[in-house]
Amino acid sequence: MRAMLFVGFVFALSTSIAAAQEKFKWGGDREGGGPFIYEEEGKEVGFEVELVKYLADKLKRTPEFVQNDWDTLRDVLRRDRTTVDVALNGYEYRPEWEKQTPSTRPYFVYTLRLIAKDGDETLNDWSDLRKRKPNGE
């Protein structure tokens, strides 16, 4: 019985070590910059870096960043799953892409904002922009 417990422990230990050594390769483009991913003192930092670390920890894998051009991330996912396991870099959801590259629920939702100088009564909504010339008049 002791031998079986020891063998079971060694097997469990070796599989957990193997899982921890397995890479969780994620594709992104650090050219997009913060707050998502950017380089600071030779390391990738940012919101998406923290998210990947969390996911890799839950999967018992080691995160590894793979630099890609942002506009090729979808193609990299479709073409070669050995290059990256996941694209995580402001990847846009589009229903027509869902069959080829399924996505998760959004972790970030981007919307446009109209910001005007305080007290500027000429700019109250998007339609007011049509009334202005490029020089602001």
Image (cartoon, rainbow, N blue to C red):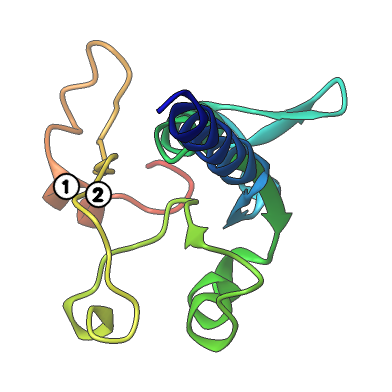
Residue 125 locus on image (x, y percent)? 12, 39
Is residue 127 among what the camera can see? yes
Residue at the (25%, 36%) spot, across then down:
113
The kind of residue tagged 1 is Trp
Q: Nearer the viewer, residue 57 or 50?
A: 57
Circle 1 SS class:
helix
Q: On the rendered structure, is 6 left or right of 128?
A: right
Q: Which disc is residue 93 wearing? A: none
Q: Nearer the viewer, residue 95 or 6?
A: 6
Above or below — where is 72 with respect to 63? below
CA neighbours of label 2 inside 10 A, class few (<14), some (14 to 19), many (20+): some
Task: Report the front residue among 35 and 136.
Answer: 35
Residue 84 horizontal/vertical position (percent): 59, 65
Position of 32 relative to 87 (above/below): above
Three-letter residue code for mark 2: Leu
Res. 70 image quadrant: bottom right
Question: Disc 2, disc 1: CB below 8 Å?
Answer: yes
Rendered residue at 24%/56% (across/down): 104
Q: Give the label on residue 126, or none.
A: 1
User: In the image, is residue 136 above or below residue 83?
Assistant: above
From the image, which quarter does the N terminus lie in?
top left
Q: The C terminus is located in which quarter?
A: top left
